[in-house]
Amino acid sequence: MLLFWLLLLGIFTYFVVRRSVANITCTPVWLLWLVMMLPAFTLAGWVAVNGVDEPAPPGLLIGLFILCPLLYWGLIQAGRRQTPKSEVVQASTDESAPQPKAPSKPSLRPID
């Protein structure tokens, strides 16, 4: 049963990472997914080896839940895509141009 939930969590996490982060970084999605799933894999391995009666050591838990988000953030920042300066300049000139206002519609009269 644990394997089923771990598989379901892995599939869900993969789609979330692919949809939310894949378009802003060049880092492979599978690597980001692996870093996100590392705490779950480690704890599932702990339970498989030691059983559910023996809790995981606090140092392991604290290390996983501090190290993995920092590693995830670092991978995203390392692979962040840079926008070319020509696009930035073009976008800023487009925003500074005055936008034409849409012609106002005549006000509607109430029905008698």
Image (spheres, rainbow, N blue to C red):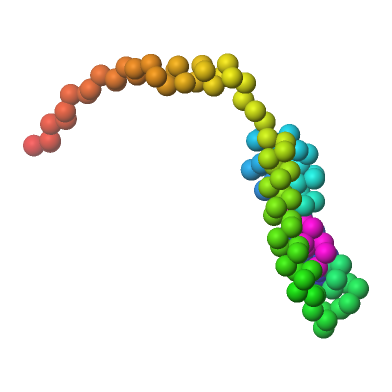
> Which span of residues is magenta-colored?
36-43
Q: In the current view of this chain or complex, which residue is farthest to the right?
A: 49
Observer-nearest of 109 and 21? 21
**Residue 14 seen from this side:** no
Where residue 85 appears, as percent x and y from the top left, is 59, 19
Q: Which residue is depicted at the point 64% across and 43% down? A: 20
Identity of the residue drawn at 16% across and 28% down:
107
* Residue found 82% across the figure and 62% down from its top: 41
Is residue 111 rendered to the left or right of residue 88?
left
| Residue 39 within the segment the image draws in magenta | yes
Q: Residue 77 placed where, x, y %?
A: 68, 40
Identify the residue shown where x is 12% and y is 31%.
109
24 vs 5, nearest the viewer: 24
Q: Where is residue 52 in the image (x, y as percent from the top left)?
A: 82, 79
Residue 103 vs 4, above or below: the answer is above
Dominant secondary-structure state across the stretch colored magenta: helix
- Picture quarter with the C terminus: top left
Is residue 104 visible in the rendered image? The answer is yes
Tell me where residue 25 sits by quadrant.
top right
State which quarter of the image contains the N terminus: bottom right
As for residue 73 lying within the magenta part, the answer is no
Task: Measuring from the top left, give residue 38's x and y in whole percent.
Answer: 79, 58
